[in-house]
């Protein structure tokens, strides 16, 4: 039991130490902001990795849930006067309900059909957000009220660094415990073979739906955090390119790796900032570096490095 608990706490503890340690070496608010964006993306990617890396289900429309979570903290306070924290919780609950309703028919599909169905869902959400200007502000976006609790207002990049870092660590802790639970073992079983999982008594449809709902909640909370950090939100948060970016982070960091989710998010958020020194060639360099990662580290950055040093998947 002690060994099991230490395994469950290893990755979240490392991430918590990383968040604390990086705070002491940040030279300016710009770096705090970039790091906060990494933690937000990592939170969404952890949820998506539960769906793709552990359950083996493809989603090309996950930015739809991200966008719904983002707009919940903009629309609910503006239209109904809800506190941003209540709006964040309501957005997560709404996305969970929507994922439950949408997931029941969609998750009966497999392979390319599932990918296209989730893609269609993401595009539909993006179109609704863009076209319903009376509610969402349309393509121009809408402002998001600042977070305030008991007279304290969340201001500054360093403050949001700690808030988003804390959310990411909590998300990682919950994900690691889920993976180590009987539910996690069932997810890994259906990832390897749905037929074999069904033979040994796993309710495949039920567990697919459970992990789909959980991943949607992760994306919703991450979207709400991004909206609160920026104080403004646009339909790009729910766009197709953002969905592809989230999937790329999962694959790049390592499918089936919680730590890989954070690494993948860090690479795809930080690299474009670092490559601006190449000016007109930054996108070319980014593409070459991503290709090199996937060619040399085919299982993803973290799993491949773990195998190289003889360790275990994180």
Image (cartoon, rainbow, N blue to C red):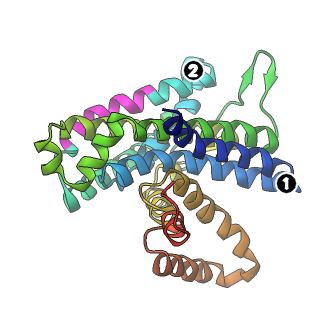
Q: Is residue 11 left or right of residue 252?
A: right
Placement of 11 over or under 270, stated as above or below: above
Location of residue 131 by image quarter: top left
Q: Which segment did they paint magenta?
A: 93-105
Q: What mark, if any, has residue 157 been given in the picture? A: none
Q: Which mark is residue 86?
A: 2
Res. 148 visible in picture: yes
The outermost residue toward the front is 2
Residue located at (68% from left, 30% from top): 145
Residue 44 x/y as whole percent: 51, 46
- Tell me if mark 1 has few (under 14), some (14-19) or many (20+) residues whose alpha carbon lies within 10 angstroms of its own: few
Q: Position of residue 93 (x, y in %)?
A: 43, 26
Is 249 above or below relative to 22?
A: below
- Residue nearest the observer in this picture, 7 or 296: 7
Magenta region includes residue 305: no
Vertical side of 70 occupied by 57: above or below: below
| Mark 2 crowdedness (10 Å alpha carbons): few <14, some 14-19, many ≥20 | some
Q: Furthest-right residue in view?
A: 27
Above or below — where is 45 with respect to 98? below
Is residue 99 magenta-colored? yes
Judge depth for marks 1 and 2 and give the one in front.
1
Q: Using residue 115 as the reference point, say whether residue 196 is left or right of it.
A: left
The residue identified by callout 1 is 26
Q: Residue at x 52, y 54 (%)?
A: 261
Whole-percent x, y for residue 196 in the image: 14, 50
> Tag 1, which secondary structure?
loop
Residue 112 image offset from top left, x and y in percent:
22, 62
Distance from disc 1 to disc 2, alpha carbons, whole Å, reads: 32 Å
Residue drawn at x 44%, y 56% is 243
Q: Compare residues 19 and 160 and report the one nearer the observer.
A: 19
Asked whether residue 143 appears in the rendered view, the answer is no
């Amino acid at each position: 039991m002690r060994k099991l608990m230490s395994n469950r706490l290893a990755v979240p503890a490392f991430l918590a130490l990383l968040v604390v340690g990086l705070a002491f070496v940040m030279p300016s608010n710009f770096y705090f902001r970039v790091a906060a964006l990494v933690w937000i993306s990592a939170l969404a990617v952890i949820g998506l990795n539960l769906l793709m890396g552990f359950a083996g289900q493809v989603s090309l429309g996950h930015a739809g849930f991200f966008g719904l979570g983002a707009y919940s903290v903009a629309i609910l306070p503006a239209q109904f006067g809800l506190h941003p924290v209540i709006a964040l919780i309501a957005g997560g609950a709404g996305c969970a309900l929507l994922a439950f309703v949408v997931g029941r028919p969609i998750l009966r599909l497999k392979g390319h059909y599932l990918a296209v169905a989730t893609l269609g869902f993401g595009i539909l959400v993006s179109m609704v957000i863009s076209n319903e200007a009376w509610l969402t502000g349309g393509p121009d976006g809408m402002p998001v009220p600042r977070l305030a609790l008991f007279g304290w207002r969340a201001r500054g990049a360093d403050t949001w660094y700690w808030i988003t870092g804390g959310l990411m660590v909590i998300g990682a802790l919950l994900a690691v415990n889920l993976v180590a639970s009987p539910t996690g073992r069932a997810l890994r079983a259906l990832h390897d073979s749905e037929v074999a999982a069904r033979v040994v008594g796993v309710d495949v449809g039920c567990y697919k739906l459970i992990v789909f709902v959980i991943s949607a909640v992760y994306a919703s909370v991450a979207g709400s955090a991004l909206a609160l950090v920026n104080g403004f939100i646009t339909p790009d948060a729910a766009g197709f390119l953002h969905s592809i970016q989230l999937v790329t982070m999962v694959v790049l960091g390592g499918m089936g790796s919680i730590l890989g989710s954070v690494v993948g998010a860090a690479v795809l958020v930080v690299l474009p900032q670092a490559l601006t020194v190449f000016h007109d060639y930054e996108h070319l360099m980014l593409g070459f570096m991503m290709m090199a990662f996937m060619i040399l580290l085919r299982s993803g950055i973290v799993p491949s490095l773990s195998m190289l040093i003889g360790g275990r998947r994180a």
